[in-house]
Image: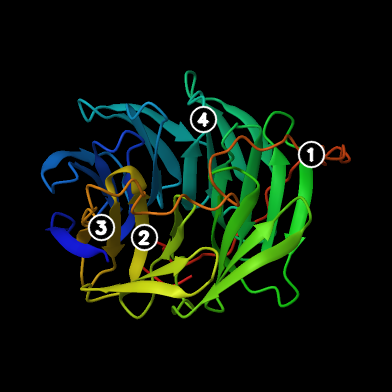
Amino acid sequence: LFVLQHTLTGHTKGVCSVQFSPNGKFLATAGADKTVIIWTPEGEMVHTLVGHEKGVNDIAWDSGSNYICSASDDTTVIIWEQTTGEKLKQLVGHTSYVFSCCFNPQSNVIASGSYDETVRIWDVKSGRTLLLLPAHSDPITGVQFNKTGDLIVTAAQDGICRIWDSQTGQCLRTLLDDTNPPISFVTFSPNGKYILVSTLDGKIALWNFLKEKKAKSYVGHRNEKYSILGDFYGGKYIISGSEDNKVYIWDLQSKEIFQTLEGHSDTVIAVSCYPKKNLIASGALENDKTVKIWSLPAPKVNPESNQDPLPPPPPDVTNNPPTSPTLPTPPTLPTPTLPTLPTLPTPSTLPT
């Protein structure tokens, strides 16, 4: 079972996002205190990145673990250099809080989702907007590239997930639940065949987006108020924070709760996994302000046994190259017009 290894204290307000670097050498955390902090997995602080004028909602690493992008309530996305902590570029264009951001696998493009109801696709080198997607009719709570970078998934408080062609900006799929609860988080599975969707009715669903059908559903945690982030732990577990101050770990296949991690004193809003080192990181809101790193102790193996102590991940969502789906060519999207937005509460500190 997972056990607590380190508690990281450095943020002066609630933690909003935690992300292990792809090479596992660093952990980046973002907070409502306007900062991004880079740590080692052993809990040593490496850099504090200062440059945003308001709270930071989301962070993402490039695939080489050299750069970080951060999305903030100040309506901008900043690109940072990891080794020096230097601010390289500030991407300006959104007209309201930027809630989600990510690099594509090639790391030459960034996608960001905002409370202005749009998704912007940015060129990393020039800092220019390449595409503006009029993605949803409510604030956008999630945006993510698939493993090849040709698809983007977006989700919003309107309860809709959409799959987009990242080159053309065309909408390829629209996924809608019968009950239509607001969506708090979305991500692709490691193999790109599924999406994981968290909703504000306390459920997490694994969707086969090509078939537009739910494959599995995970329950037990509490999520009615905040945009709580989840993650895949390889092809074996689903991980999520919860409003009862715990981290929940489900068996991906059986949907049973494998373990809950207790120790935070406020809503756990962010989690990140690094299965190669058996690590989970979690970050909690204002009354806690800490990041905790949990690890799975190495199993004891009988030296005479050739058996792998952990079974291989099931084929469902692992990194086996998926067969390329053929998606229908959708109609061209209309030219986006930005709606006038009402004043919204700051998402990094207040409930959505």
Q: Is residue 95 above or below residue 4?
A: above
Q: Residues within 10 Å of mark 3 (few under 14, many from 20)?
A: some
Q: Which residue is mark 4?
A: 105
Q: Which residue is mark 2?
A: 270
Amino acid bearing label 3: Leu
Q: Which residue is mark 3?
A: 296
Residue 300: image quadrant is: bottom left
Q: Tags 3 and 1 in contact by the CB under 8 Å rule?
A: no
Q: Residue furthest top?
A: 125
**Disc nearest the viewer among 3 and 2:** 3
Q: Earlier in the sequence, mark 2 or mark 4?
A: 4
Q: Position of residue 306 (x, y in %)?
A: 33, 45
Task: Work out whether residue 57 or residue 309 is closer to the camera in this orientation and state it.
Answer: 309
Query: Dot 2 lies on which element?
Result: strand
Q: Residue at x 56, y 49 (%)?
A: 189
Q: Is residue 106 visible?
A: yes
